[in-house]
Image: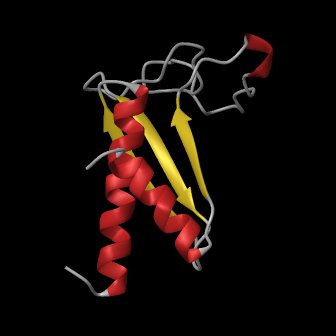
Amino acid sequence: APGGACALLQELSEEQSFAISYLDIGERHAPSALPQNPPGCRGARGDPAVSPADALSLSGLHQCLVELSTQPTTVCHGSGPSRDGARAQAARNALQYLRIMAGGK
């Protein structure tokens, strides 16, 4: 489909009046913008819970969350070899969820 899942989700959001926001998990931030780790929030190997490096999944994929301002709020996850790929997968997952909730096939 031209434009893919992200474009289709955008069209649906305009038609059904809900907002979409993407959160790219582990995007690089300036060191001063990183939240401080509270005590006890370190990984099993003593790694900081928030790393300045890209937080790829264990399989090396980029990750993304897409939030829909539906009632109730919907959040879907996606992963892929690139940021855009992760966003597209999150959008596909959101579309699948909406189809299930609407009772369609």
Question: In percent of the image, x 61 and y 69: which residue is there?
Answer: 18
Instruction: State the residue lying farthest toward the left.
Output: 105
Q: How many marks?
A: 0
Instruction: State the residue lying farthest toward the bottom.
Output: 103
Q: Please give left or right for residue 73 compared with residue 7 in the image.
A: right
Picture quadrant where residue 32 is located: top right
Q: Please give left or right for residue 97 compared with residue 26 in the image.
A: left
**Residue 87 image position (x, y, % from top left):** 42, 40
**Residue 85 image position (x, y, % from top left):** 34, 33
Instruction: State the residue lying farthest toward the front.
Output: 2
Residue 101 vs residue 25, the one in the foreground: 101
Q: Please give left or right for residue 11 compared with residue 105 in the image.
A: right
Instruction: State the residue lying farthest toward the right.
Output: 32
Quadrant containing the C terminus in the rendered view = bottom left
Q: Is residue 52 above or below residue 43?
A: above
Question: In percent of the image, x 31 and y 45: which residue is there?
Answer: 2
**Residue 91 image position (x, y, % from top left):** 39, 52
Question: In percent of the image, x 55 and y 45: which residue is there?
Answer: 22
**Residue 84 image position (x, y, % from top left):** 41, 31
Picture quadrant where residue 44 is located: top left
Residue 34 vs residue 88, the one in the foreground: 88
Residue 43 vs residue 58, the one in the foreground: 58
Q: Is residue 97 above or below residue 7?
A: below
Q: Is residue 87 above or below residue 84?
A: below
Name the colour scheme: secondary structure
Question: In percent of the image, x 73 and y 12: which residue is there?
Answer: 31
